[in-house]
Amino acid sequence: MDRSRLTTAIALVALGCTAAAFAQQATSPNAEMSAKVDRSIADNRITKSVKAELAGPEGVGSTDLSVTTNDGVVTLAGSLDDRIAIKKAIAVAEGVAGVRIVRSAGLRSRD
């Protein structure tokens, strides 16, 4: 192989590697954004489900309760009538599909 063909071959390989790297960078942010949106939708669904269960007949019926979800981790905060209601709220939240952990340090008993 003569020198000009070798130079051309090396240039084409380098160009191909560069194009592949740019293509990967171009798709990575889209994939990350899509994953974030999917997690956000799932977290929103979990929050709504936990709130619905807490307000339902098996729940604690309190409007002084805040529910947030981040990556399947539910955080409960607010005031409930007593320690039994707090335990019940935690159990209800743990029973919702998609909940990984329930954090309840922000719950307070009124009694």
Image: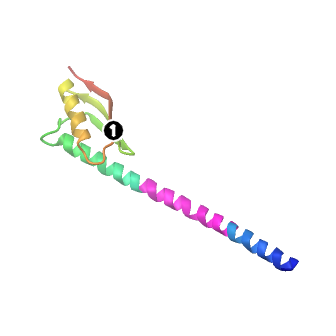
Q: Is residue 88 above or below residue 97?
A: above
Q: Looking at the image, which residue is at 18% across and 41% down?
A: 55
Q: Looking at the image, which residue is at 26% across and 28% down?
A: 79
Task: Name the residue nearer the viewer: 35 or 14.
Answer: 14
Q: In this view, does 19 lie to the left or right of 72?
A: right
Image quadrant containing the C terminus = top left
Type of the residue with mark 1? Ile
Q: Main secondary structure of the magenta part?
A: helix
- Residue 10, position as x, y percentages in the image: 78, 72
Q: In this view, does 39 lie above or below 110?
A: below
In this view of the protein, can residue 82 be seen by the observer? no
Which quadrant would residue 103 be assigned to in this image?
Answer: top left
In this view of the protein, can residue 43 be seen by the observer? yes
Q: Residue furthest left?
A: 57
- In the rendered structure, does residue 33 fall within the stretch colored magenta? yes
Task: Name the residue nearer the viewer: 2 or 35.
Answer: 2
Please rate how many residues cluster around mark 1, counting C-alpha atoms within 10 Å: few if below 14, some from 14 to 19, many from 20.
some
Q: Is residue 20 above or below residue 48?
A: below
- Residue 84, position as x, y percentages in the image: 18, 26
Q: Residue furthest right?
A: 3
Which quadrant would residue 69 be assigned to in this image?
Answer: top left
- What residue is disc 1 on? 101
- Residue 56, position as x, y percentages in the image: 15, 43
Q: How is the image coloured?
A: rainbow
Q: Which residue lies furthest to the top in this view?
A: 111
Q: Residue furthest front?
A: 1
Task: Name the residue nearer the viewer: 17 or 54.
Answer: 17
- Residue 41, position as x, y percentages in the image: 36, 54
Q: Looking at the image, which residue is at 50% across and 60% down?
A: 31
Span highlighted in magenta in the image: 18-37
- In the rendered structure, does residue 1 fall within the stretch colored magenta? no
Q: Is residue 7 left or right of residue 54?
A: right
